[in-house]
Image (cartoon, rainbow, N blue to C red):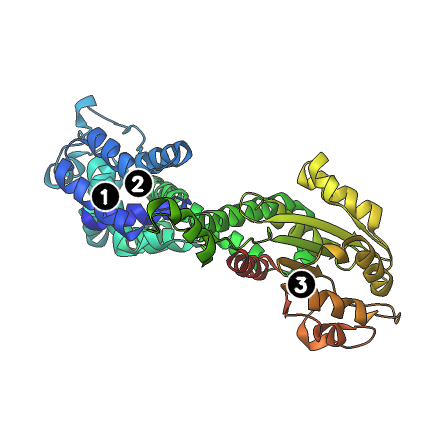
Amino acid sequence: MQSNLVSFIQVLRSHDLRVSPAETLDAMNVATTLGYSDRALLRDGLAMTLAKTPEEEAMFLTCFDRYFRHDLVDLPEQESAGDPESAAPDTQGADQGAGQAETGAASPLAEAASENPTLEGVLASPLMQSLVNNDRNALTMAIAAAAERVGLRQIQMFTQKGQFTRRILDEMGEDQLRGAVIELERLQSPALVELQRYRDILREQVRDHVEREYLLHAEGKTRQFMDEVLQTTRLNNIEHMYVNKVHELVRKMARKLASRHSRKRRQFRRGQLDMARTMRKGIANDGVMFTTHWRQIRRDKPQILAVCDVSGSVAAYAKFLLLFLYSLQDVLPRVRSFAFSNYLGEVSGYFDDYPVEKAIELVNWKYGGATDYGHSLKDFARLALDDINSSTTVIILGDARNNNGDPQLPILQSIYQRARQVLWLNPESRRVWGSGDSEMLRYQSACHFTAECNNLRQLERIVDQLLKSTS
């Protein structure tokens, strides 16, 4: 049961429920204390231990019911050719079923078995007895045991459903049943139709079992796999049909980073002891300095200036950087945004007046076009250079391709001298920096940090480092 509980927690994690190793141990203690006899009591106890939000509780209850529910297979009603009492109930054993098979003179399968020792052996097998006798309990247990032996819980992709179905059937001995069908086809026996019906019933029940297990174990893994693919795909290669999914991923990453960095308490420097003021306040106490006074160090509030190239080749990357930054408003310091192609303007007001997606759409529409980094740097210096100080982080997102214009490197150097740090994120591969009309190698000399950034995984890592440096 502990193994089942660990497997259940893995299912919860695949459905995005956060369960730590310590909470896993707590769940085991709860299960040991409550026991496994009362399912409702165990469910409520584990829910109180593992679910931390109403959404997680709803997902927990769904996964619990699907994981610990073991419905019997849905076998069709037994067709009786003679006495209505000839059909064996579910609880009948294999011996009684075999006896009925022998006495069922009206059954073509029984008649064929009496003439063929091989078919008689197949008919006497536990698998065939559970099918012939409509024994739902025995067949359910046989399918579950075979699924456990072939490792069905490890299924991850929908393409594996057929593979696991075949493995389970082979593990249950369906190959003997298949061989008997081939033999009856060769003999053109009238028992062929009946045996094929049992074979099809078995296959259908195994397929249903694999489908249920796939939905439980692999649905979350498939979603995680898809998220992994989208996180490592170049943002400009993501098809439009996945854009909403990528937006959801960005918000999920932002929540994770916000949770990680919001726990940190800000540490304030007390400053140096103000001796003169402390001694003056101590005169009333005969010079005893009961109260100390400190020279407080005033720190300017940090700010982030995001400068994004929204020309055609880089617009997709700028969109997700802005979406990331504005999804972290509760954690990041004050963010001012600027967009440019051939000229630059501040677009912070768009994000105050519109939802993030709408604001980004308006920014791309207004500032998109051919790229002129030199002219855009002049505009940026006019709008924001005086506001840059030792508490300012400047993030520049662009490919540095200037169409052979003047790069205005001295402006970027003055920004470098004033700012706390200048980060340049380039969506192009490092191997092509400096090729053609790229000014990246020259701009790199006036940056504290440069990085290739063209997918969500890289963007998350850089924003994480940014949060650490501004906390």
Q: Nearer the viewer, mark 3 or mark 1?
A: 3
Q: Identify the residue shown where x is 84% and y is 67%.
A: 402
User: The disc labelled 1 sits on which kind of residue?
Assistant: Ala
Q: Nearer the viewer, mark 3 or mark 2?
A: 3
Residue 366 visible in this rendered orientation of the protein: yes
Closest to the observer, 109 or 445: 445
* Residue contact at pointers 3 and 2, CB within 8 angstroms: no
Closest to the observer, 221 or 356: 356
Q: Identify the residue shown where x is 39% and y is 31%.
A: 54
Tag 3 secondary structure: loop
* Label of residue 140 in the image: none
Q: Identify the residue shown where x is 46% and y is 47%.
A: 262
* Label of residue 419 in the image: 3
- Residue 363 screen position, x and y as percent: 78, 46
* Residue contact at pointers 2 and 1, CB within 8 angstroms: yes
Q: Is residue 55 left or right of residue 369?
A: left
Q: Residues within 10 Å of mark 2 (few under 14, many from 20)?
A: many
According to the picture, the residue beneath numbered tag 1 turns out to be 27
Closest to the observer, 212 or 166: 212
Is tag 3's residue or tag 2's residue first in the polypeptide sequence?
2
Q: Quadrant of residue 160?
A: bottom left
Q: Residues within 10 Å of mark 1 (few under 14, many from 20)?
A: many
Tag 2 secondary structure: helix
* Residue contact at pointers 3 and 1, CB within 8 angstroms: no
> CA separation, marks 3 and 1?
50 Å
- Residue 214 screen position, x and y as percent: 40, 46
- Residue 247 screen position, x and y as percent: 61, 45
Tag 1 secondary structure: helix
Q: Quadrant of residue 446?
A: bottom right
User: The disc labelled 3 sits on which kind of residue?
Assistant: Ala
According to the picture, the residue beneath numbered tag 2 turns out to be 50
- Residue 301 screen position, x and y as percent: 59, 50
